[in-house]
Amino acid sequence: MKKDIGKVIAKHRKAMKLSQIDLAGQLAEHNIVITNAGISAWEKGNTTPSAEALLTVCEILKINDIYTEFIGENPLDPFKDLNTEGTQKALEYIDLLKKSGDYKKQSAKLIDIKPRLMKIALISASAGTGNLLDEENFEMMEISEPVPKKANFGVYITGDSMEPRFHDEELVWIEQKDLLESGDIGLFFLDGMTYIKKYVVNKSGTFLVSLNAKYKPIEVGEYSTFKIFGKLAED
């Protein structure tokens, strides 16, 4: 059965020999601003603490089993069917497991990303140049974000033709290749323009296809000037 929140707070506050002013002061240290009169209103049931305030009160008053304290028997409590002696033995066994070190929870390891010196194209896709891969079209930049292992250089996208996957001015990484398979996303030169597109080959011909449906596929004609610069690099 649900318990009176105010009465539970008052019981634990008094057990810790804290006045309402003391509790208000400790709450202020956690950036919860309330007066002793406000705490009195909680305890009388005139007002109810916010979720953030209640959780902070529980931390201060060392209320560990919040469910049991404020609602009733916790159906998920692993000790609910044990008597005092059984609970104590279970806790002792848990302590032994902790001390063994064999069952320690593994904390998430922070990935140490070392900066990588990468070539970044000075000319963005759609700017247009058949000589994009010439060295003078790049600058070297130290990149601290993850970069695919196979990436040879980066290029910025221009426009929204590859949305929703890629956005205007987004930096993408290219693995330099001369041949692609149909369906690959790559960097291309076609008749004076440079494109990031999906490469599609079918019975109708060869096309550079946008991911944004509002753009029509661009056909690579029989007499087109066409180059494949590379494939989108992915891990």
Image (cartoon, grey):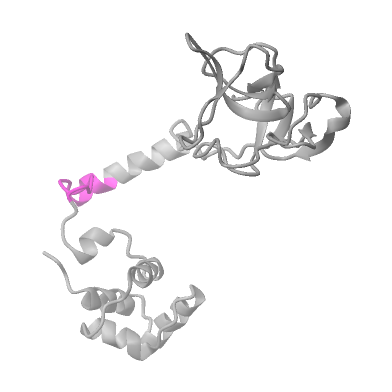
All told, the count of numbered labels is: 0
**Is residue 84 within the magenta segment?**
yes
Q: Position of residue 126 (x, y in %)?
A: 68, 35
Q: Residue furthest bottom?
A: 37
Residue at 28 percent of width and 61 percent of height: 66
* Above or below, comparing residue 53 to residue 117 in the picture: below
* Above or below, comparing residue 33 to residue 219 in the picture: below
Residue at 33 percent of width and 60 percent of height: 64
Residue range (magenta): 75-88
* Above or below, comparing residue 190 to residue 93 in the picture: above
Q: Residue furthest top?
A: 203
**Is residue 180 within the magenta segment?**
no
Q: Position of residue 127 (x, y in %)?
A: 73, 36
* Above or below, comparing residue 150 to residue 164 in the picture: above
Q: Residue furthest right?
A: 136
Residue 198 appears in the picture as rendered: yes
Q: Nearer the viewer, residue 61 or 27?
A: 27
Q: Nearer the viewer, residue 210 or 97?
A: 210
Q: Nearer the viewer, residue 6 or 199?
A: 199
User: Residue 90, located in which quarter of the rendered image?
Assistant: top left
Q: Which quadrant is home to the N terminus?
A: bottom left
Q: Position of residue 171 (x, y in %)?
A: 67, 38
Residue 147 appears in the picture as rendered: no
Residue at 23 percent of width and 44 percent of height: 78
Q: Taken as a whole, is the magenta stretch helix, strand or loop? A: loop
User: Residue 158, located in which quarter of the rendered image?
Assistant: top right
Residue at 72 percent of width and 17 percent of height: 225
Q: Which quadrant is home to the C terminus?
A: top right
Q: Position of residue 184 (x, y in %)?
A: 56, 19
Q: Residue furthest front?
A: 223
